[in-house]
Image: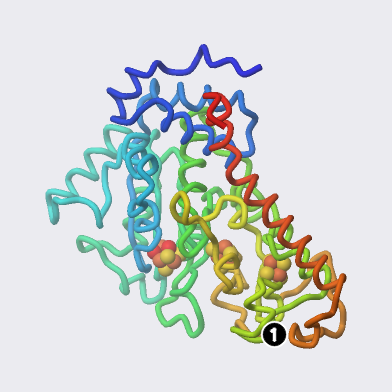
Amino acid sequence: MYDDSSLPPADEVQTRFGIDRRDFLTFCAGIAATLGLPRAAEAQIASAIVSKERPSVIWLHHQECTGCTESLLRSEHPTLDKLILDIISLDYHETLFAAAGHQVEAARLAAMEKNKGKYLLVVEGAIPTKDGGIYCKIAGQTSLDLTRECAANAAAVLAIGSCASWGGMPSTPPNPTGSTGVGEALGRSDVVSIPGCPPNPYNFLATVVHFLTFGKLPDLDAKNRPLFAYGRLIHENCERRAHFDAGRFALEFGDEGHRKGYCLYKLGCKGPETHANCPIVLFGDVGMQSWPVGTGHPCIGCTEQGIGFAKPIYALADLKNQRPPVTYARAVEEQGGGATAASAGLVGALVGAAVGAGAMLTKKIRHDEDGQE
Ligand code: FSX
Ligand code: SF4
Ligand code: F3S
């Protein structure tokens, strides 16, 4: 039985966030589900967001496209974009701040002094290290020096996006500026990485909310990525997986197999060697949620160092736990092929429906509670 006695009252939520309690709790349920926590955590998260002081965040930009910030703040989802700036206190952000020059640098120093040892440092973009780091400067300081200065008294350092995690796109060969990730540039092994180009905004938010609610960062894998988001291969949760297992592949963009939604492995999909929760959490807004493979594009492995921006699209993924058949029939040869083709398609549809159902779970829970569905 779900006990909602500890949930914040509706008027408090409305006053604090300007949204109704139902939307707020749906958001909390989504964060709890993203973190892989049980229903009971929803109340704990809701109460922490409402009652605890917003963590101060210093956000730096280096070599990147600003896609991480864009994906976080350009959401049309009414709850997400409203809540981000109510959950964190964004005390320095070079792209979003209206102020500029000495004024904004003074704000950064003041926020760092006031929240010494308590603020989160979020770094977006790779850091150039060649020639003393002169290839990216902010307010006269190199990215390297600025990051060192800001990291010194941070409670935790988060690398958002693949550029900040290991160098990402700017570090592709010949890497003329010696770009690298934050952990390597600082010589620190405790920098939390949230890779993706861009990363899913929910993975960043869930990490921050975990810190806010439980006073610590979530469990990490060997590459310092939160396990809740990067603990599984994409291939394990892909809606096209049944087609892979049945040896049904798109062989060219636009061919019949591609149009039928078959597996994209032969088109270079790196899902079998890429860890991320893209097929579960999805991207975009309600009603339009999808992910690269869902739209018919092979995963390029953007969350995986050594795969994204490193392994060409024509190279087949290394299979960690499965081997497909040696030969592949073209979809056109299977027309009228009868039960096998039809049943494989059906299984694919069912798996896709099951994954979709999982992603929609939190929304349905809310409906069920209200007796509307
Ligand atoms: Fe861009 Fe972020 Fe890619 Fe990098 O995301 S979306 S190039 S990971 O640092 O802005
Ligand atoms: Fe999905 Fe790619 Fe795996 Fe095929 S190879 S099942 S498209 S993740
Ligand atoms: Fe990136 Fe592949 Fe997900 S390209 S967004 S890891 S599906």
Residue 92, x across and y down, in percent: 26, 47
Rendered residue at 69%/79% (across/down): 257
Left or right, 52 with respect to 259, comes to left
At 31% from the left edge and 24% from the top edge, which residue is drawn? 14
Q: Hey, which residue is sitting farthest top in the picture?
A: 5
Residue 302: in sight, yes or no? no
Question: With 238 as the anchor, is 156 left or right in this view?
Answer: left
Question: Which residue is more in the foreground, 179 or 370?
Answer: 370
Crowding around mark 1 (Cα neighbors within 10 Å: few <14, some 14 to 19, many 20+) is many
Disc 1 residue type (three-letter)? Leu
Query: In the rendered view, does 215 fall on the left or right side of 114?
Result: right
Q: How many marks?
A: 1
Quarter of the picture containing the N terminus is top right
Percent x, y of residue 171: 48, 75
Disc 1 Cβ-to-ligand 2 distance below 8 Å = no
Q: Residue at x 33, y 31 (%)?
A: 19
- The answer to which image quadrant residue 223 occupies is bottom right
Q: Is residue 113 above or below residue 354?
A: above
Judged from the image, the secondary structure of the residue bearing numbered disc 1 is loop
Question: Quadrant location of ligand 1?
Answer: bottom left
Give the quadrant of residue 68. bottom left
- Residue placed under numbered mark 1 in the picture: 251
User: Dividing the picture into quarters, in which one does residue 350 lie?
Assistant: bottom right
Q: Is 190 on the left or on the right of 63, as rendered?
A: right
Nearest the viewer among 91 and 36 is: 36
Q: Position of residue 348 (x, y in %)?
A: 74, 62
Q: Is residue 30 visible?
A: yes
Q: How is the image coloured?
A: rainbow
Give the quarter of the figure containing the C terminus: top right
